[in-house]
Image: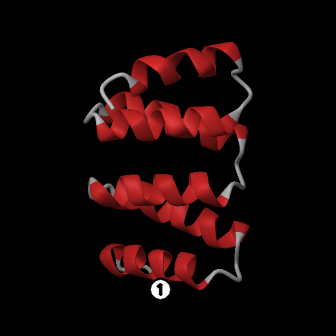
Amino acid sequence: VQQAPALLERDPRLAPDIAALYYRYGMALYLQDQTKEAEESLLEAARLAPESPQILMGLALFYERFQRWEEAEEFARRLTAAAPENRDFALIRRRIENRTGSP
């Protein structure tokens, strides 16, 4: 796992328009406790694929983990807009909204 960030770091630079690579790289950084760099990579993934449920869920949970409720709520709302039929995503959104006091 220690080598994963170094190996994945090359992929986004070679193909900057591939959101999945940024997402995987961001998750690898997160697992290595490099949260600032992880956030940057995950946000780039969301910029490249703004309606990707996987990426939106990852960011909602990322921000929830660090109790950054405003950002968590934003991505939870985007997540349920991208996949309104998904009950699990609706539960994530409700859980986050319960923390923020949103209706």
For disc 1, the neighbor class at 10 Å (few under 14, some 14 to 19, many from 20) is: few
Of residues 34 and 3, which is closer to you in this image?
3
Q: State the image coordinates of residue 87 (x, y, percent, origin top left).
A: 59, 85
Examine the rendered structure and indicate whether residue 17 appears above or below residue 71. Answer: above
Q: State the image coordinates of residue 7 (x, y, percent, origin top left).
A: 48, 19
In this picture, residue 24 sits left or right of residue 31: right
Q: Which residue corresponds to the image point at 33% horizontal and 32% vertical from the top-left?
A: 1
Q: Which residue corresponds to the image point at 41% horizontal and 36% vertical from the top-left?
A: 28
Examine the rendered structure and indicate whether residue 16 appears above or below residue 98. Answer: above
In this picture, residue 51 sits left or right of residue 74: right
What secondary structure is found at the residue carrying circle 1?
loop
The residue under label 1 is: 103
Examine the rendered structure and indicate whether residue 99 appears above or below residue 69. Answer: below
Disc 1 residue type (three-letter) = Pro
Q: For residue 102, which quarter of the picture?
A: bottom left
Q: Which residue corresponds to the image point at 46% horizontal and 75% vertical from the top-left?
A: 92
Q: Which residue corresponds to the image point at 34% horizontal and 31% vertical from the top-left?
A: 36
